[in-house]
Amino acid sequence: MIYWEIFLAFFIPNIVGYGGGPASIPLIQMEVVDRYGWMTVSEFGELLAISNALPGPIATKMAGYIGYEVGGVLGATIALFATVAPSLIAMVFLLGILYKFKDSPKVKKMTSFVKPTIGVLLGVLAIEFFVTSWEGAGTWQTVLLAGGSFLLMEKWKVHPAFVIAGSLLYGALFLGHVSS
């Protein structure tokens, strides 16, 4: 039963998460944290940060880790397959049809409605992570990390991977005592 749940937890978000990995992350969080309770919001946020810092698609890295934690090697294999299966199905069966109708006003209208929805989902996810950080690490730590990250990326154009790595290092050194 656990393997079926792992499959569903990653297949459904990735089949309805139009827009790739970043669009499916809030949906995966809902499955993994809210529905099945395999992780806390804080743990999911840490996994997301680590997944962002590593090269490659975010969703597959998260699926592999969570699948392994929940169901071992077979769980990781199932989670990875469930993550890539929607794209595989779409490429095999739907790409030709979509390409044929790519200039259709209905397809363009559908895309224009999906993009703001993805933005809202990512915004809600960011707010949840901010609140969790605020409650767990405290006001000053959260303001320091958020403000510092913003300045590093926007003002000094530091690559996000370095900012994430620095934040992870800061958290390990100065926030290791904070319990989740």
Image: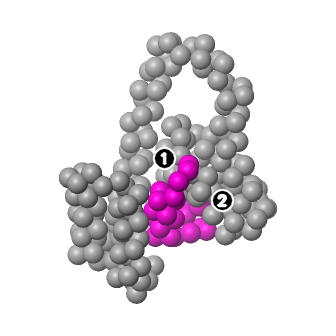
Residue 56's place in the image compared with 89, above or below, is below
Badge 2 element? helix
Q: Is residue 124 magenta?
A: no
- The x, y position of residue 128, in whole percent, is 39, 61
Residue in the picture at 53% in, 37% down: 18
Name the residue carrying label 1. 22
- The x, y position of residue 139, in whole percent, is 25, 74
* Residue 28 quadrant: bottom right
Q: Which mark is residue 69?
A: none
Looking at the image, is mark 1 or mark 2 earlier in the sequence?
1
The quarter in which the C terminus is drawn is bottom left
- The x, y position of residue 59, in whole percent, is 57, 51
Please tell me whether the stretch drawn in magenta is mainly helix, strand or loop. helix
Q: Is residue 128 left or right of residue 12?
A: left
The way the protein has been coloured in the rendering is one colour
Provide the residue span drawn in magenta. 31-57
Badge 1 element? helix
Name the residue carrying label 2. 64
Residue in the picture at 51% in, 37% down: 19
Q: Amino acid at mark 2?
A: Gly
Residue 45's place in the image compared with 21, above or below, is below
- The x, y position of residue 114, in whole percent, is 45, 33
